[in-house]
Structure formats: structure tokens, C-alpha cells
Image: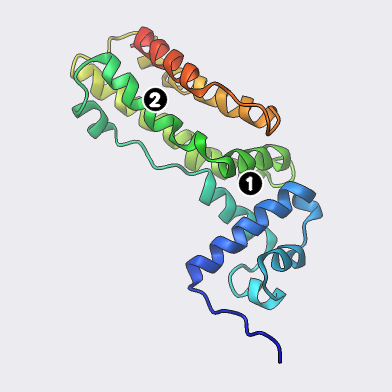
Amino acid sequence: MGTQRQRLPPTVRVGQILDAALQEFSIAGYAGTRMDDIALRAGLSKGGLYAHFSSKEQVFEALLARHLCPPRLDAHALVAGSSTPRHLAERLVNHLYASLANPAMIATMRLLLAESGRVPHLARRWRQDTADAHQNDIAQLLRLARERGLCGDGVALRHPWLLLSPVVHAIFMAILVGADERINLPERREAHVALICALL
């Protein structure tokens, strides 16, 4: 008599599917991965996989949403709880680097970069929903900081993306280096805080 497959809550099963998909996409790329491969790695039948996702593109999109959409910045709370420009910079940097400790985020970003030409609409959607949204959050934070006297009328106010540049660089370095190489995140974070203080 065969063993019966355990019935799991949909959220748990979807998590298993996305874990399996990330492994398969990382090995074979988007084009080389089949729904059969994802189902097999997730321990599901193909029908079981299709009960949750109707296409490989939908799986890929869910993977991006899961790992590349960190929590939005609460600009009001960050500014209200900051007593000095340095305190504000430290709190902002803590928020920005929170997702860097997650290897799945780095693997998913590597995948997005490799496959952006193949699925440009998903790359565009990520840029609009995540990258542009975070830049807008930073712009709002700077306007609020200016009202509270924590920020001047300098270059940061005119170019809020500058405050994101060091963390973007850290992410790309993490993507480029091998798994056995480590980036000195504490040193980078401290340098990022110092840069934001100078820009404010």
C-alpha cells in the first residue's frame, strides 16, 4: 500500500512550491525549467502544482513578490522617532539592509537579472512596484525630515535615489561573489550611514 500524501494548508504548500521553483530556476534558468521539474522537487503531482499555479510565469511572478518586495518604508514613523540626522540615517539603513541577510532574496535577484530579457514585463513590474515605490518612500521621508529640521535643501532632497545606491551596490556585489565569499556588511552599513549623514 502506497503512502498517502500529507494534506497541507495552501500557504504552506505554496511556500514549498516557491522554494522548489527557486532551486529549479537557479539550476536550469527560466527557459530550462518545466512545471514537471518544479512539481517533482516540491513533492507534488503536476496536477497538484496546477491547483496552485496555472503557469510557470505565474510561479516566477509569485517568487519575485515573495523575495523582492521588502516591507514598505514607514516614512512618518522613521522621521518621528529620530532625534538627529544620524539617528534617522541609522534607522533608514537598518530598514534597507534588513533583507540582505536573506540568501533567497539574493538568489531571486540574480534570477531576475539573468531572465529580465526573457520576461521583461515581470522585470518592469518589479521596478515599478518595488524599486520605484521605495524611491518614492525615500523622497517622502526626506520631505518630512526637511520639515523637522533633520535634512537640508541639499542634493539628497533633489536626488533621493542617492540614499539607495550603497545598498543596491551591496546587493549586486552579493550576487556577483561566490557563495563562500562574504561581504563585510557591518562596514558597509556604517559607511552608508556616514554617506547619508553627509547628504542630509
User: Which one is nearer the viewer's eye here, 115 or 153?
Assistant: 115
Quarter of the N terminus within the rendering: bottom right
Please state if 139 lies on the left or on the right of 48 as rendered: left
Q: Is residue 47 above or below residue 150?
A: below
Please state if 125 lies on the left or on the right of 193 as rendered: right
Residue at which label 2 appears: 93
Please state if 187 lies on the left or on the right of 43 as rendered: left
Label 1 Cα neighbours within 10 Å, binned few <14 / some 14-19 / many ≥20? few
Q: CA distance from mark 2 to mark 1?
A: 30 Å
User: Which one is nearer the viewer's eye here, 155 or 63?
Assistant: 63
Q: Position of residue 49 (x, y in %)?
A: 65, 71
Q: Residue at x 48, y 43 (%)?
A: 129
Q: Position of residue 95 (x, y in %)?
A: 38, 32
Q: Secondary structure at mark 2?
A: helix
Residue at which label 1 appears: 121
User: Which one is nearer the viewer's eye here, 154 or 51?
Assistant: 51
Q: Residue at x 54, y 21 (%)?
A: 184
Residue 84, image quadrant? top left
* Mark 2 residue type: Val
